[in-house]
Amino acid sequence: MHQEIKQSIVNILRKYLYISLGKVDYKLLKVNPIVILCYHSIADDGWAFSTSLEEMEAQMKLILKTHRPVKLSEIVEHIKYKKPFNRPVFAVTFDDGYQNVFTAKKLMRELEIVPTIFLLSDIEKIDRVNLGTDLKFLSKHEVKLLKKSNWQFGSHGSTHRNLNELSLEDTTYEVIESARSIRKQYTFTPKTFAYPKGRYNNSILRAVKKAGYVAAYSMDDGFITPKTNIYKIPRVGVMGTHSLSEFKYMYSPLVVKTRMKIKQLIGLQSK
């Protein structure tokens, strides 16, 4: 009960901070030009990392008022080749590959959004404690159906273990073997990687590069430009505790800068 009260207070303070800072950006006509949203589960089940389909629909319709949807691969091209966008853009990603994400297929098609899913490759050995849920994962058939609908796929490692705590051998398994396993299971090779829980260090970055991934995504806060490190691309995490009024401002420049400073102070983001 004490933890629930503490979390409720944190949520209230966060909401006040986001809306207050976001309104300043709104008055100054400042917009974050490139946003990558990170979702996990699409369900109304009370899990902190679950967003209901109805909430996601409202969020997508809201961001579509200011940003144009693009594929994640287009943002990689912007970073690598300095390909400009003529207006603010956003991309949608899903980490882990939960089965309930399939329920968003119709909505994404209707809104002309092409998401990317970062799959875990060794489902039978998943670190459920680290993951924090017993939710089912997408079947091979469902992955293939989403692939036919032009959804993009990357790797999220093999078992979702915290890469910062692993030996070089285990890190290699999580990073390299996950790509091989996905290729074997689905007959396509993932070109991008998302760090489990967004955590990484220099050794992990080297392993990802050596594995041949063309880009990798963190949960750091920051702004995406042609100068962005292609293996530390920031994303904005969307949780079930975010209200629609918070979502409206959670990717605005002042909010991103403030969240980045807070993460740096508590050691959750590289400086």
Image (tube, rainbow, N blue to C red):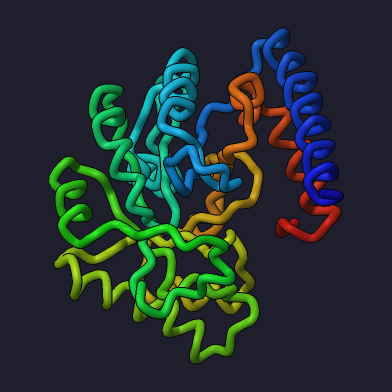
The percent coordinates of residue 40 (x first, y second) are 47, 48
The percent coordinates of residue 203 (x first, y second) are 59, 79
Residue 87 visible? The answer is: no
Residue 121 visible? The answer is: yes
Q: Is residue 142 left or right of residue 162?
A: left
The residue most toward the front is 1
Instruction: Tell me: residue 18, above or below residue 95.
Output: above
The one of 89 and 17 positioned closer to us in this rendering: 17
Q: Is residue 117 left or right of residue 187?
A: right
The one of 5 and 33 positioned closer to us in this rendering: 5
Write down the quadrant of residue 184 in the picture. Answer: bottom left
The residue lying at 27 percent from left, 76 percent from top is 181
Instruction: Tell me: residue 120, above or below residue 73.
Output: below
Instruction: Tell me: residue 40, above or below residue 190.
Output: above
The residue lying at 32 percent from left, 61 percent from top is 191
The residue lying at 35 percent from left, 51 percent from top is 117
The percent coordinates of residue 167 (x first, y second) are 58, 89
The residue most toward the top is 27
Q: Quadrant of the C terminus?
A: bottom right
The percent coordinates of residue 72 (x first, y second) are 37, 43
